[in-house]
Image (cartoon, grey):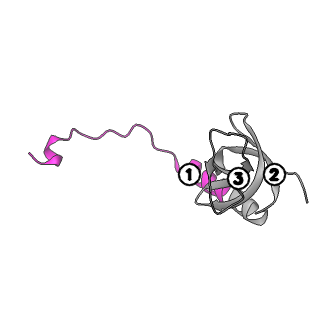
Amino acid sequence: MSYQQGMHQQKVLYRADESSIQKLRSMREHFHHICRHYTNQYVRIETMDGQVFTGRIVKCDRGLLYLAVPNHGTPRAFFNPFYNQDELILTLVLYELLVITLLYT
């Protein structure tokens, strides 16, 4: 029996409407531009879930923001040998961010 024969009819559970897709793309591009402009700057970020992170923007790529945070045993961050060992890299999804505040200029 082939894979196709064993499959049932596929049912779409959710499909975003075109206006939502365009809005998300626009927001992602806007955040990406901001984050790239402020790379290596210290920021405070608040997410839609109310979590707050303080750190240095390391990189922004493909809808993700890489934030270097102090190494205080943060469970959601990853050690990166290419950066300061006192920092861990936290990966955040751009469209989940509500507020990005520049801390130092």
Query: What residue span does the magenta drawing correspond to?
Result: 1-29
Q: Report if residue 30 is visible in the image.
A: no
Task: Looking at the picture, tell me which residue is in the foreground, 6 or 102.
Answer: 102
Label located before the other in sequence (2 or 1): 1
Residue under label 2? 43
Q: Report how far apart the C-alphas of labels 3 and 2 lie in the structure.
A: 9 Å
Q: Is residue 66 above or below residue 47?
A: below
- Quick check: 89 left or right of 70? left
Three-letter code for the amino acid on which mark 2 is drawn: Val
Tell me residue 35's x, y (percent): 73, 59
Q: Report if residue 8 is visible in the image.
A: yes
Tell me residue 105's x, y (percent): 91, 60
Three-letter code for the amino acid on which mark 3 is drawn: Leu
Mark 1 residue crowding within 10 angstroms, few (<14) / some (14–19) / many (20+): few
Label disc, if present, on residue 21 of the rendered structure = 1
Callouts 3 and 2 close, C-beta under 8 Å: yes
Q: Report how far apart the C-alphas of labels 2 and 1 lie in the structure.
A: 28 Å
Q: Is residue 34 above or below residue 14?
A: below
Q: Is residue 1 above or below residue 57?
A: above
Mark 3 residue crowding within 10 angstroms, few (<14) / some (14–19) / many (20+): many
Q: Report how far apart the C-alphas of labels 3 and 1 lie in the structure.
A: 26 Å
**Marks 3, 1: nearer the viewer:** 3
- Quick check: 11 left or right of 67? left
Residue under label 3? 67
**What residue is at 28 percent from the left and 41 percent from the top?**
10
